[in-house]
Amino acid sequence: MKPRPSKKAFFALTAGVASLAAVAAFAQESLLPPGFGNQPPPANRPQPAAPAPAQPAAGPTQATPAAPGASPAPTLTLDPAIFASAEPDAPVAPVEELPPSARRSIDAVGPLAGLGPNAWGMADGRFLSTLMRRLDAPIVSRWASITLRRALLTRVGTPDHVSAPDWIAERAWLLLRMGEADGARMLIEGVDVDRFNAKLYAVAGQSALAGADAAGLCALADGGAIRSREAVWPMARAICAALSGDTAIADVLMDQARRRTRDPQGIDVQLAERMMGVNGAGRRSISVEWTGVNQLTAWRFGMASALGLTIPADLYRTVGPQVVAWSARAPMIPPAERLDAAMMAARLGVFSNSALVDLYAQAADESGDFSSDTPAGRLRLCYAGDDVGARLSAMRGFWSGEGQGDGKQVDRYAGLILTARAAARIAPDSDHVSDVAGLIGSMMSAGLDRKAAAWAPVVAGMSAGKGDDAWAILAVGTPRTVVDLSADRLSAVADSWSEENPQKLRLLLAALAGLDRLQTEEQMRLLQEYQVGFDNRSNWGRLLLQAADRKEPATVALLVAVGMQKTGWSGLSSAMFATMIRALHDVGLDGEARMIAAEAMTRL
């Protein structure tokens, strides 16, 4: 009989392997503008007869060449110099635009109480800013993203060694790269414009474009043209003059802006003139031609979405998924055209179950069609079908594409989010065992953990093999233990998954260890057998555990996101996962830790 190792030894088993993985995760850095240039441009878009010369489009830290044949983009390129250092700017004499009584303090900025005023603790502002800037967003976990959003939107003061405008700009910039256009806007709106520096002007302009809010540039355009070198401001000034009714000034500014671009008739100028025409600026109301355009930029996205124009679908393949999430919120795009984008936004953590259902209802209201062959009609069946069988059948359609016809691309996890509250309306019943994993996963995707826990007796009555998926979600997702976690039950799952899904098994054991739900020596022996432990040796692991010891929930949320910079759950090491769950648990974010673990069990 093998000697029984100590509990401490179990937790250090994979620290060496985790160290390598954590260093790789810690070192990742996005060198592109947020969401742009992550995919090669489509090759099948028609080219113009005489292509305009290419112009580079810079990202936050490095210039990235534009696609061949693309017109120079007056996009918000974010001058790399503004992100070169997190040191405070030299003092500048303030421009008094508001009386002292009306000015808002920037000692603490954020729209939410969130994680509390001490969420970042005593962490160095330079360290936090570097982590935020280098984070390759969006991250793999919806619930980790939701947790990080709460941290970034929490009303907090400015940490040491960074200026208040820079600190706000870094938080907003990361929110934009996560797909959180609304969150970035709310954060920036908490600061009076006369407090902006060059970095905050640049990020605020990006936020307005991401939110498809052309008018949102107008409060920024004059100051941005003075304080920031971003190429967006000349055309923005012309557009804002036209929107305010100063047609003559708008014409002069637009002519000046046109002379500064290499393609005075290109898509970017067309969009600007079309926007100017919204207020009746004469000859500016023109058609927009996408022929020859091979790259979507922030300017093109923001202006086209604000005008309600349809952006060619193949251009979305030239950007990251966060840009699709931006489009899901664009108010001028018809709701029916935003449904697929909203499903992706839900998977990224940008859209909630309620927001998704509301959008489907808006699409139905606009069309007046609630028939069962429309998306809104199928969703209505999930909530109000004639009987439980009809409601479950409609839900399966969103989970697997059943009944939606061939060729329909289905995002299963987004479908689970969409039907979460419909699933919560199904009473626990052993007649529905074939759908129990889907129902529980759906409820957990929206945080309905207590509703999901009510299914524990049904899961307990299922055979081990058939009930394993549902059992695993409940094992890590409920507020208290409601399923059998004995060594025998764990061993049965391990025997089944060790060959067919070893990654899911390792993350299950890691989550249970992180939540401190493994207590007996027999349970702990499974950690040794499958080489699952905590990462307490890598630089990332030490930083995370130290932040947890100091009770800094926001710092923990950011470091967890750093560890989630993966293309999928299959690339996440069990040691890193166990450390993430334990750190969140230790700083009072037990609910978030459980939802991340339940998400892993649902998506693997």
Image (spheres, rainbow, N blue to C red):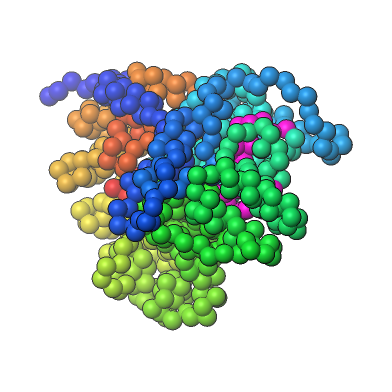
The residue located at (14%, 23%) in the rendering is 2
Spot occupied by residue 94 in the image (x, y as percentages of width and height): 78, 28
Magenta stretch: helix, strand or loop mostly: helix
Horizontal arrangement in the rendering, residue 409 relative to residue 320 (left or right): left
In the visual, does 238 lie left or right of 34? right
Residue 469 against residue 117 in the figure, above or below:
below
Q: Can residue 561 be seen in this view?
A: no
Work out whether 535 lies above or below 78.
above
In the picture as drawn, the residue positioned furthest to the left comes out as: 1
Residue 200 magenta: yes
Region in magenta: 195-218
Q: Which of 86 and 526 is in front in this view?
A: 86
Quadrant hosting residue 76: top right
Q: Is residue 253 visible in the rendered structure shown here?
A: yes
Residue at the spot x=80%, y=31% of the render?
95
- Count numbered badges in the picture: 0
Q: In which quarter of the image is the N terminus?
A: top left
125 left or right of 400?
right
Q: Give the image location of residue 285, x and y in percent.
A: 61, 64
Is 570 located above or below residue 338 in the figure?
Answer: above
Q: Is residue 541 left or right of residue 111?
A: left
User: Image height check: is 243 above or below 516?
Assistant: below
Residue pictured at 35% horizontal, 75% vertical: 389
> What residue sits 70% from the left and 53% below the top?
250
Residue 432, x across and y down, in percent: 31, 67
**Along the line of sight, which residue is nearer the eye, 475 or 302?**
302
The spot of residue 215 in percent (x, y) is: 67, 53
